[in-house]
Image (spheres, rainbow, N blue to C red):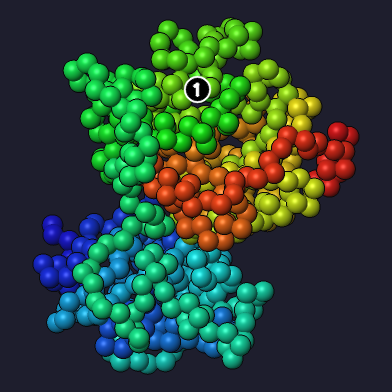
């Protein structure tokens, strides 16, 4: 039996508009997940804001003529309109003239919403109360159905900012005036208008530069060391690269030889983080989309120029590996390596870690703004403890916070301290953080992963590429760069050289393994008897 045509589909001609078509309503997800929200700014016949909440496999939608206000006294009219498909959340573009809602559309805000109580019941009762965690809107809000009669049969609701620390008087601050731009593209709509552009369906990920096939400067630097070898092979840094034209990342078009060039070009930056330290390789012989496997030991695989460490470092296993030259770095790329992960200790003092890592890993639905704030909060706690910390993008979804240490405490002590820091932060801000592993514990939150601080565990190295579409890179940044960071995947193998050329100073200037974990720090975290 044919599915009834929805009001959303009935109003649109998808042969003309590039708005997303409606598929079968999403089934209720069995796995725990955060509920998303999005606010579109829509320059149709009248400029307005479309407030949308994910609920029951769709986007419940309200048209808010004046947009949201942070003033609890300004109760904004919100006209309940037809449900939109979840795929509409990322839509930006221009709806053609003659079509329903003709005009420009941008994503003004997005993030997750946390309902108070049963959302299905409170929606049915006409009194939704919830917390927003967005790029622009945060804090406590309410949507309340009224008895007001509008045009047609559309319900009239009110969007109300609840009284909290985020609320501000309307005569003091107007967020829609102060922040008119899209959180995806940076574009603006309405007066002053911008030239209309062809519609496009924007993804949920924060904006990132499209990877170039290879950075021109990197090509210039490495072309002199690239020589034709035997048929079907080329030499990079005196390492013979087989199948050099094999595409390892479809999104960017990067070939195997391009990745070898990348690692040659950043050798001076990455080798200090690899030197004298056990390394594990994430190998992807068929590229990002193929099978991936993690290799911690040298085993029987002959990786060109790689250094094999003393068997005593990891009893009962094959030898651990170390990469200490550009030839070993390129040799690993020859064997299908994309990612490099390092231990938290050097091989000469393997039982005393020289740093610990807090890996801030967010629910995928959280807006990037939440990650910046979470990193700032984590740094503030470490500052209060008297520990200097350094930060880098993960190249995935989150951020890595690294605290260098004097080689003094053993693995159990360092891991225990990192765990105590994570649990302290999660205890102080349970609505934002969790220190407990598992997807159900991370819904709408950021997991502070302290488990990378165990003996034998590892973390992706600074300047390592990641085996993800676009080949993003894990990149150290200075603290004063954090506020302007757009994404954990802001840099990739195609554009990192541009950043490095512009740097006036080392982002991690002052990094030194001199700090100690003290009894006072344990007590500050509420841990006695250490």
| Image coordinates for residue 360, horizontal then vertical, percent | 58, 46
Give me the residue at 83% from left, 41% from top.
522
In the rendered view, does 367 fall on the left or right side of 388? left
In the rendered view, does 310 fall on the left or right side of 59? right
| Image coordinates for residue 93, horizontal then vertical, percent | 26, 70
Q: Classify residue 336 by image quadrant.
A: top left
- Depicted 220 relative to depicted 345: above or below: below
Q: Residue furthest left?
A: 15
- Residue at which label 1 appears: 325
Q: Residue furthest front?
A: 224
Give me the residue at 13% from left, 59% from top.
2
Give me the residue at 42% from left, 67% from top.
183
Please tell me which residue lies in front, 346 or 123.
Answer: 346
| Image coordinates for residue 111, horizontal then vertical, percent | 47, 62
Q: How many marks?
A: 1
Q: Classify residue 35 by image quadrant.
A: bottom left
Q: Is residue 259 visible?
A: no
| Image coordinates for residue 526, horizontal then vertical, percent | 83, 45
- Image quarter of the C terminus: top right
Give me the residue at 33% from left, 47% from top.
211
Identify the element where label 1 is drawn. loop
- Image quarter of the N terminus: bottom left
- Depicted 73 relative to depicted 522: above or below: below
Are there few (<14), some (14-19), or many (20+) residues within 10 Å of tag 1?
some
Q: Classify residue 523 by image quadrant.
A: top right
Please tell me which residue lies in front, 379 or 275.
Answer: 275
Q: Is residue 310 visible?
A: yes
In the rendered view, does 32 fall on the left or right side of 529? left
């Amino acid at each position: 039996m044919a599915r009834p045509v929805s009001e959303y589909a009935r109003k649109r001609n998808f042969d003309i508009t590039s708005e997303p078509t409606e598929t079968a309503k999403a089934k209720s997800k069995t796995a725990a997940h955060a509920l998303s929200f999005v606010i579109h700014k829509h320059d149709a016949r009248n400029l307005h804001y479309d407030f949308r909440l994910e609920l029951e496999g769709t986007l419940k939608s309200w048209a808010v003529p004046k947009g949201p206000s942070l003033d609890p006294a300004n109760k904004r009219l919100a006209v309940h309109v037809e449900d939109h498909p979840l795929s509409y959340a990322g839509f930006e573009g221009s709806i053609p003239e003659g079509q329903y809602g003709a005009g420009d559309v941008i994503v003004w805000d997005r993030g997750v919403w946390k309902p108070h109580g049963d959302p299905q019941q409170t929606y049915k009762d006409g009194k939704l109360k919830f917390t927003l965690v967005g790029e622009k809107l945060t804090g406590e809000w309410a949507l309340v159905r009224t008895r007001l009669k509008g045009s047609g049969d559309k319900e009239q609701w009110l969007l109300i900012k609840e009284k909290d620390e985020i609320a501000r008087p309307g005569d003091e601050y107007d967020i829609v005036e102060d922040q008119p731009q899209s959180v995806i593209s940076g574009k603006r709509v309405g007066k002053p208008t911008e030239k209309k552009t062809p519609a496009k369906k924007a993804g949920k990920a924060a904006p990132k530069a499209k990877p170039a096939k290879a950075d021109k400067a990197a090509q210039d630097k490495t072309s002199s060391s690239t020589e034709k070898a035997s048929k079907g092979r080329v030499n990079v840094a005196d390492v013979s690269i087989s199948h050099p034209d094999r595409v390892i990342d479809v999104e960017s078009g990067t070939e195997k030889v391009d990745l070898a060039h990348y690692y040659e070009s950043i050798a001076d930056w990455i080798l200090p983080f690899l030197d004298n330290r056990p390394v594990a390789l994430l190998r992807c012989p068929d590229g990002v989309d193929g099978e991936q496997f993690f290799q911690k030991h040298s085993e029987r695989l002959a990786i060109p120029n790689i250094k094999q460490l003393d068997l005593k470092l990891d009893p009962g296993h094959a030898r651990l590996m170390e990469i200490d030259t550009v030839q070993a770095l390129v040799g690993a790329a020859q064997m299908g390596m994309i990612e490099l992960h390092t231990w938290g200790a050097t091989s000469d003092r393997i039982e005393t870690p020289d740093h610990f890592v807090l890996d801030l890993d967010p629910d995928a639905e959280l807006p990037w703004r939440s990650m910046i704030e979470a990193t700032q909060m984590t740094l503030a706690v470490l500052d209060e403890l008297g520990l200097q910390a350094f930060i880098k993008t993960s190249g995935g979804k989150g951020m890595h916070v690294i605290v260098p240490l004097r080689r003094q405490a053993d693995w159990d002590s360092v891991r225990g301290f990192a765990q105590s820091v994570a649990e302290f932060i999660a205890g102080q801000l349970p609505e934002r953080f969790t220190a407990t592993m598992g997807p159900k514990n991370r819904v709408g939150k950021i997991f502070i992963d302290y488990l990378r601080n165990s003996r034998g565990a590892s973390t992706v190295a600074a300047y390592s590429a990641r085996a993800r579409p676009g080949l993003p890179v894990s990149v150290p940044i200075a603290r004063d760069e954090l506020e302007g960071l757009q994404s954990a995947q802001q840099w990739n193998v195609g554009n990192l050289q541009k950043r490095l050329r512009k740097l006036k100073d080392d982002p991690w200037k002052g990094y030194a393994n001199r700090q100690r974990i003290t009894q006072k720090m344990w007590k500050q975290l509420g841990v006695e008897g250490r």
